[in-house]
């Protein structure tokens, strides 16, 4: 409806501008008629001045019902009293400047006055023109009647167009509102599901892993397990609490991806895993906070899998940020590679009931718009490649990720 009303307002200005130019042209053509009595210029001058005023108003805001009534009143007054200011040879014709000016006026009264009032204003124009013309000598009753009928038909066409287009615009607005409401509901459901899955991942990444470590811990490992329990509690409290309620020791989302990965590596080193890190210098391009949290948590789970299942105490982590130009929504492309030279496994034989690879890595990365690829072979180690944004085609790993993964599997010594 807003778009339609804006277009009609623009059309009203264009039509009124054309009508103003037409008045000036007719005054120039019939200059001898107006030169004989200067007072005859009063009516066309008033019509031009009022048209300019209305155009200036409509250019700033939409026509109001009050303006529609005032506009109609001005032209009704012109129709009743300005017939003497029209050259007799064209006074009763459809192409006289008075008829053309009144036909342009019908746009505002038909489209912007309230429903019943718009009908009254539209029909008052041909009636006033007929009455004003009958007060003067009629040169041709047939042409006079044709001009009045022309104004009436034009007004009725505007009213019909208003009814049809306003009705369709209102229906389109209603459809958009319903679609927006449905989208909002779907977004709320999606957000709830993502939040629930993240809580499940946190439970898997922290509580379950710590309980497993506790079950296998010996008397000398109690202090380390207690420290892991404290870290898990801090992480879960920071995730479940409000932003302003985070406890001082909780793990907060870092300011950039490199800092987040450094924090994850420091945490895993504290748990006894030797991690070689290559993140480059500087802070790099800005990355959305949700992406930082998702990628860093996925990298943490990948390193936890190395510590728990790879049969090796050593892993390598590399971070690569590539700035993109000309796209404000996607400032860069990032890759985080986690690899080890441990026992490896066959991805096709992994039990689907296991949540670590599927939810804590793959789904978590996908939820932020990224993609995870896991390459492993028995006895050849494992490479986990996390990238954001995801590849253009769903399910396709970015070539850079595969290249780095293949090199990592083939090299006999770490690149970092």
Image (tube, helix red, strand yellow):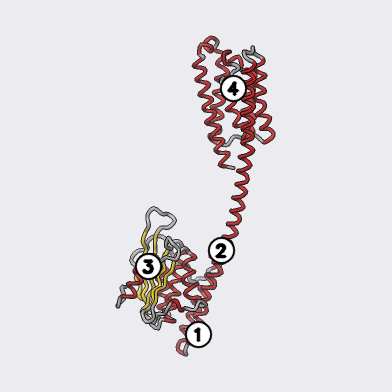
Vertically, is 101 above or below 326?
above
Residue 319 numbered tag: none
Seen at 50% across and 81% down, the residue is: 210
Circle 2 SS class:
helix
- Measure how far apart labels 4 and 1 are at the Cα level: 95 Å
Q: Residue furthest bottom?
A: 219
Q: Which badge, 2 or 3, comes first in the chain's sequence?
A: 2
Circle 3 SS class:
helix
Q: Which badge, 3 or 1, comes first in the chain's sequence?
A: 1
Which-is-in-front pick, marks 4 and 1? 4
Q: Residue 414's image quarter?
A: bottom left
Q: Residue furthest front?
A: 142
Circle 4 SS class:
helix
Q: Please provide percent x and percent y for residue 65.
A: 64, 34
Residue position marked by numbered label 1 in the rendering: 214
| 410, 223: nearer the viewer | 410
Residue 401 numbered tag: 3
């Amino acid at each position: 409806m807003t778009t339609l009303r804006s277009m009609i307002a623009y059309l009203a200005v264009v039509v009124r501008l054309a009508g103003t130019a037409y008045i000036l042209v007719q005054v120039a053509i019939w200059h001898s008629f107006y030169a004989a009595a200067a007072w005859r210029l009063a009516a066309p001058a008033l019509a031009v001045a009022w048209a300019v005023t209305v155009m200036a108003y409509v250019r700033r805001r939409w026509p109001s019902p009050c303006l529609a009534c005032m506009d109609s009143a001005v032209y009704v007054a012109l129709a009743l009293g300005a017939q003497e200011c029209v050259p007799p040879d064209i006074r009763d014709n459809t192409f006289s400047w008075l008829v053309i000016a009144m036909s342009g006026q019908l746009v505002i009264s038909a489209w912007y006055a309230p429903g019943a009032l718009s009908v009254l204003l539209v029909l008052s124009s041909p009636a006033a023109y007929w009455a004003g013309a009958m007060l003067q000598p009629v040169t041709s009753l047939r042409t006079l009647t044709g001009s009045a009928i022309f104004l009436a038909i034009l007004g009725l066409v505007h009213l019909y167009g208003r009814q049809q287009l306003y009705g369709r615009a209102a229906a389109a607005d209603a459809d958009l509102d319903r679609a927006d409401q449905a989208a909002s509901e779907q977004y709320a459901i999606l957000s709830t599901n993502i939040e629930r899955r993240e809580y499940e991942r946190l439970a898997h990444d922290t509580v379950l892993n710590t309980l497993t470590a506790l079950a296998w811990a010996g008397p000398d490992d109690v202090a380390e397990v207690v420290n892991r329990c404290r870290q898990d509690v801090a992480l879960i409290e920071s995730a479940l609490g409000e932003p302003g309620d985070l406890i001082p020791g909780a793990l907060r989302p870092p300011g950039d991806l490199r800092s987040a990965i450094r924090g994850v590596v420091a945490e895993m080193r504290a748990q006894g895993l030797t991690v070689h890190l290559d993140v480059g210098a500087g802070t790099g391009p800005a990355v959305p906070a949700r992406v930082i949290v998702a990628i860093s948590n996925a990298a943490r789970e990948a390193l936890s899998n190395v510590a728990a299942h790879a049969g090796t105490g050593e892993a390598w982590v590399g971070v690569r940020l590539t700035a993109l130009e000309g796209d404000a929504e996607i400032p860069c492309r990032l890759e985080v590679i986690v690899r080890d030279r441990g026992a490896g496994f066959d991805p096709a034989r992994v039990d689907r009931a296991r949540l670590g690879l599927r939810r804590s890595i793959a789904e978590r990365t996908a939820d932020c718009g990224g993609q995870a690829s896991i390459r492993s072979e028995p006895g050849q180690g494992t490479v986990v490649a996390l990238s954001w944004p995801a590849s253009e085609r769903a399910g396709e790993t970015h070539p850079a990720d595969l290249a780095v993964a293949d090199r990592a599997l083939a090299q006999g010594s770490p690149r970092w």
